[in-house]
Image (cartoon, rainbow, N blue to C red):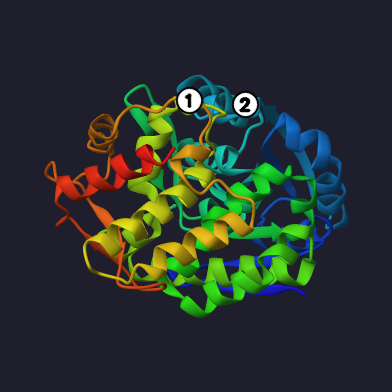
Amino acid sequence: MMNTVHVALGARSYDVEIGPGLLAEAGARIAPLLKRRRVCVLTDETVASLHLEALREGLAAGGITMQALALPPGEATKSWPHLERAVDWLLAEKVERNDIVVAFGGGVIGDLAGFAAAILRRGVRFVQIPTSLLAQVDSSVGGKTGINASHGKNLIGAFHQPSLVLADTSVLGTLTARDFLAGYGEVVKYGLLGDAAFFDWLEGQGPALAGGDMAARVEAVTRSVQMKADIVARDETEQGDRALLNLGHTFCHALEAATGYSDRLLHGEGVAIGCALAFELSARLGLCSQEDPSRVRAHLKAMGMKTDLCDIPGDLPGAAALVDLMAQDKKVVDGQLRFILARGIGQAFVTSDVPRVAVLSVLEDALASC
Ligand code: GLY
């Protein structure tokens, strides 16, 4: 039950290994990359308490010793003070140019540790060991690293590809149901953006997958990562096709900003709601049939996921204020809102040609139905 996805980026190519039990094999998998058998691990306190000993043993089995720094869990860690702490610690640990930094955690740790590796001694290699579903299917692959600024999320960063990604699917067993389903929002996104057969499969297998079926989990992570790897290989620095990965994200970013990046809405939950809204917008613009948004919403609901604006607890601002929040997204080009729309399930495309009034009416109707 072990799969490998290759990310083909010339000299920066690497493999993503996917399957249960990879922590135990971490030493054997990482050793070929090392000049000296020692790694520094950046993690968070939650992941450390659950899984750090297993990683230590897995590395030791391959003859590798490790030092670890556990940062506080949560989005606030993706900030200058924690980056400074991480970089200072890596320097104190005397990490050299030929060493490897290990990012062991979810998206926050992956982004922060990757960025720390990118700037340490002008760049050292790093290995991603993602522990959340969201990190396994999205953020650990593709080399986007960084931290948040007071001006917005992910505004400080670098493209820095990992040398290896180890996605141990047995680790997903310790996620809360809410975190797992938030990550599943990104899995659904892949089917919706480029693979209708995968979406069909998710409609059938989603409940088993959420219930813990390991073969289904490995298959879902593999197909998601394969799609991401193909897109990243075509467009590493997001000049074109990579923007497809942002399906649902224009709406999501506005909703995250409106909820103060708080526990009211997790990123993956916002992506799921955003995908439903993007399909609704596509149907209203006559790009796809009305059955498509209904089908998207039906699957999210069947999975017990947040699907509609009404599922977000607390008050939301009005439609016009939400559109204004979209305009602050870093992916706005020349002041134009950019959307990923769809001609059907699995057929997404990027466009800046969306009338503001159409976006407003989708949001007004969504808010009115609450
Ligand atoms: N998460 C979107 C990307 O990696 O491009």
Residue at 48 percent of width and 63 percent of height: 296
Please tell me how crowded label 2 is: few (under 14), some (14-19), or many (20+) other residues with Cα within 10 Å.
some
Residue 339 spot, x, y in % from top left: 26, 54
User: As displayed, is residue 127 above or below residue 15?
Assistant: above
Pointer 1 and pointer 2: residues touching (CB < 8 Å)? no
Q: Position of residue 113 (x, y in %)?
A: 56, 39
Q: Which residue of the protein is positioned furthest toward the front in this rendering?
A: 369
**Of residues 345 and 74, which is closer to you in this image?**
345
x and y, in percent, of residue 282 in the image: 28, 62
Crowd band around label 1 with a 10 angstrom C-alpha radius: few (<14), some (14–19), many (20+): some
Residue 290 drawn at (x, y percent): 35, 67
Quadrant containing the N terminus in the rendered view: bottom right
Classify mark 2: helix, strand or loop. helix
Give the residue at mark 1. 79
Q: Earlier in the sequence, mark 1 or mark 2?
A: 1
Which of labels 1 and 2 is toward the front?
Answer: 1
Residue beneath the point at 48% across and 25% down: 79
Ligand 1 sits in which quadrant? bottom left
257 or 103, nearer to the observer: 257
In the picture, the quarter occupied by the C terminus is top left
The residues bearing labels 1 and 2 have C-alpha atoms spaced at a distance of 15 Å
For label 2, the residue is 89
How many numbered marks appear? 2
Q: Judge whether residue 241 can be spotted in this image.
A: yes
Q: Is mark 2 within 8 Å of ligand 1?
A: no
Q: Quadrant of residue 157?
A: top left
Name the residue located 64 percent from the left edge and 51 percent from the top edge: 304
Answer yes or no: is residue 127 visible: no
Q: Amino acid at mark 2?
A: Trp
Residue type pointed to by label 1: Ser
